[in-house]
Amino acid sequence: MANDFIVPNWHPLFIHFPIALLVLGFLIEIITFARPRGGFRAAGRWMLLLGAFLALPATTSGIYAFRDVAAPAQLDVDQHWHQVLATNSWSPGHWDAISDHIWYNSGAVVLFLAAVGVWLGSSDKWRCTLRLPLLAVVLVGLVLMSIGAWHGGELVYKFGTGVEPGAPAGGSTAGHGLTWYIPPLQLHLVLAGFAVALVVAAVALMVRRWQLDRRVPAPAAPLTEGQPVAPGIMALDVPAGAGQPIGPASDLPQNRDQQPVAPPSEVYPGWFWLGAFGLAIVTAVAGAWAALGVFSKAAFREGLEELRQADHRRLALHVALGVLIIVLSLFLAALVRFARRWRRPAGILAGLVLLLIAWQIWVGVLITFDSPEGSLFRFAAVTQAGEPATMPPPAAPARTPVPQPSPSTEPVRGSPAASQQPAAAPPPTAPGAAPHEEIGT
């Protein structure tokens, strides 16, 4: 684990906010079910919105937390995942608990974002129609989140995940640099979660504005005498024929059941796209800080040289995807602001941004867990990390030559020295001959 100011990592700081907001927002939605309007219910829906979007930075901080606690030593992103597992001493029950914690909470986050995104992007009519189904989706997400949170408690209080038993009770904070207080890699992942949340909100609001633009407000009711126009002002002089619309509205067909509809409230997805653009830039700066360590010309040159190397293609793709997301976010902010009627190009580009973000998250996971080197689609195998799958055969021992007696020192037949010589080896036999038959006989 990393030796930082906040031990073990930032994940425990972010997980409590979405849990509290989502639970309270859902309870308020149930309590005010019979009264669809009111400030109390509006507060509950704001809690659901904020809780769902804050679940994203909590999730991205959890990615770092898992990689941090899996390695018993200081986190090293240049290690492959199988190398980390080789030094890990967790029991099978420990691995089952952390696996359940990840899968249950990930499923809950997906359900929360789906429910909130659909509600935020729907018209008023569809919000009323989908109210019960979306509440059911949120309820299932709360159940999954509760199970995942229980496994998270088991990880800490039963298996001791992220706990340092031998750590001192206190210590001095003097002599530490900025990276000790704000680890760059953690900052990069948390900011990425906030940026993705803004992108999801921008896409949903963009869809809602498309539906509001199709809605034609009904003509307002005509003024009659004695009707207040503004506080303290009455309509006194009403021309003859009051009670009927005047002007082009008189040509519209009259419907006895038609009620005056107020103009729809305006939404501004362009501001969210612009916010996502700015936050994506800050996220990229934090990522450069994590990769380079220091901002200098020499560090930038070295970083560019690494990006050109074939074994750093994961990092190169991560940078390229980040640049594309930043550029497209700025372009969409301008498109939805100045070309409001270009819905199809805006929708295609928004879908492309979401696909790029999904790919970016996967590449980021590969870099965090399996180093910048390796395949773009899977974790590195043992042989890809420079370690052979099988041990090479042992080398044959060197043979020492046996000295042969020279002719001058050959002992005389019958002498004691001759009797101590080993018997001569039998001559080789032919392939088809019997062992006792000599070649050539």
Image: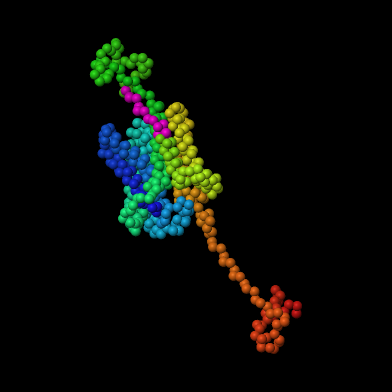
Quadrant location of the N terminus in the rendered image: bottom left
Q: Which residues are magenta?
A: 260-274
Q: Furthest residue to the front?
A: 175
Residue 257, by quadrant, is top left
Quadrant location of the C terminus in the rendered image: bottom right
Give the residue drawn at x 40%, y 37%. 198
Q: Furthest residue to the top?
A: 240
Give coordinates of residue 197: x percent, y percent. 39, 39
| Residue 266 lies in the magenta stretch | yes
Give the residue drawn at x 28%, y 12%. 238
Give the residue drawn at x 31%, y 54%. 170
Q: Is residue 226 visible?
A: yes
Of residues 222 and 352, the one nearer the viewer is 352
Q: Count the marks.
A: 0
Q: Is residue 61 visible?
A: no
Give coordinates of residue 290: x percent, y percent. 44, 46
Give coordinates of residue 161: x percent, y percent. 36, 55
